[in-house]
Amino acid sequence: MAALQNSTFDAMKNKQSQLLSEWINGLEASGATRNLKDHDLQQQTSEFLQLVINGLQDDNGTHINAPGWEATRQFLEKLSHSRALLGQDSQQTASFIFALKGPLFALLQSHYREQPALLAEQLWEISELFDAFGMHTIRTFQKSREAVIKRQQEELLELSTPVVKLWDGVLALPMIGTLDSQRTQVVMESLLQRIVDTGSEIAIIDITGVPTVDTLVAQHLLKTVTAIRLMGADCIISGVRPQIAQTIVHLGLDLQGVVTKANLADALKLALTRLGISLGKAV
Amino acid sequence: MGDFLLVTIQVDMHDQLALTLQDDLSERISRTSARGVLIDISALDMVDSFIGRMIGTISGLSKIMDAETMLVGMQPAVAITLVELGLTLPGVSTALNVERGMKLLQERVRQQ
């Protein structure tokens, strides 16, 4: 593969403002600038073109992982982030870059009018370079989306297992959704820490929101119960639905003496009785 | 503490220290005819399988010497580790802190 010719580079440098205006016109015609502020558009197009020219000037070839393209890569990453924030997808961001190809190809065509072989070479080089730029924006876009998803997953995990205080010395943990080993870990840690912090003797785990209980879920529940007991508190499981009760019996699951109640109210009554508290109606 | 012994584990236990503790404890129980032993592990931030087993051994030891045993102050991280290691310390009573543990211990000894 032949390298980019110096005359290509010179032509680009000399016709910079023409390239810019053609690029912007192309973008506006395709509607890609709809949500962009005019000032941002001007600034991003001129900055990118300048970076490309600088990169070519240092004779860095078309491998954009070379250190000479560092500034351009950083620009592309910044662009990708800002476009993602605007709600644009990776295709729109990459198209922004690809739209410069049109004016560049037109420029090369007029410049190498008399040398078709050289023209083909240069067109190929430029095409490779810009494809690499576009791919880089897409890759960055993907990575930042994945980071968002991961952060949301962590937040979801924390949100879905709140520990609430029902009474002095009684904590409740309403479980919603399936119980897997990762959630069990989070649940155990937060519940145990609250028990220590509040000095609560009884923890009520309500499983009304747990769709199914199989041997694995039961194992996770029992681990939590054992840890609570090791620390010197006790546990009541409430919200046992009829289907769950049937499943537990059919599977022969041993709940190791944990008291189970059909609903949270009964569990609370039991907890209060154990603490020696009685409630009476005001006459 | 009258009829009761208080054992506070505060430093990192290595093999020799643990064995020394076991010897000391059994000797003290027998000498003082202690009725109850309170083992406070609230200073332990984390345990490994060795310490876990040691806690179980010491609790078992005092039980065999006919002293009511109570383990208090277990931190969450320690409880989780013990459960994961499968060291569930069967037959060992536990309480959240020294005050509660003492109260329960006294009730138990009185009932005897």
Image (tube, helix red, strand yellow):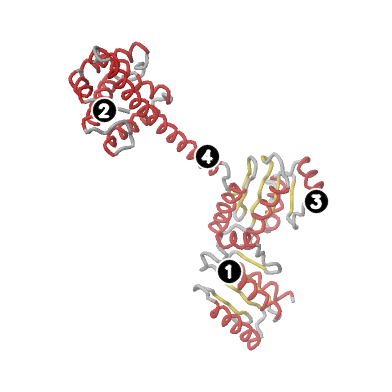
User: What chain does mark 3 sit on?
Assistant: A
Vertical side of A236 occupied by B45: above or below:
below
First of labels 3, 2 by sequence position? 2
Circle 3: residue type: Gly
Circle 1: residue type: Glu
Residue picked out by circle 1: B99
Residue picked out by circle 4: A153
Vertical side of A152 occupied by B14: above or below:
below
Circle 2: residue type: Val
Estimate the spatial distance between the alpha carbons at disc 4 and disc 3, rounded to whole Å: 34 Å
User: What chain does mark 1 sit on?
Assistant: B
Q: Residue furthest left?
A: A14
Q: Secondary structure at mark 3?
A: loop
Residue density around tag 2, few if under 14, some if 14–19, many if 20 or more, within 10 Å = some
User: Whole-percent x and y of residue B84?
Assistant: 62, 59
User: Whole-percent x and y of residue B6?
Assistant: 58, 77
Q: Out of A166 and B77, give the one closest to the viewer.
A: B77
Residue picked out by circle 2: A52
**In the rendered image, which quarter contains the N terminus of chain A?**
top left
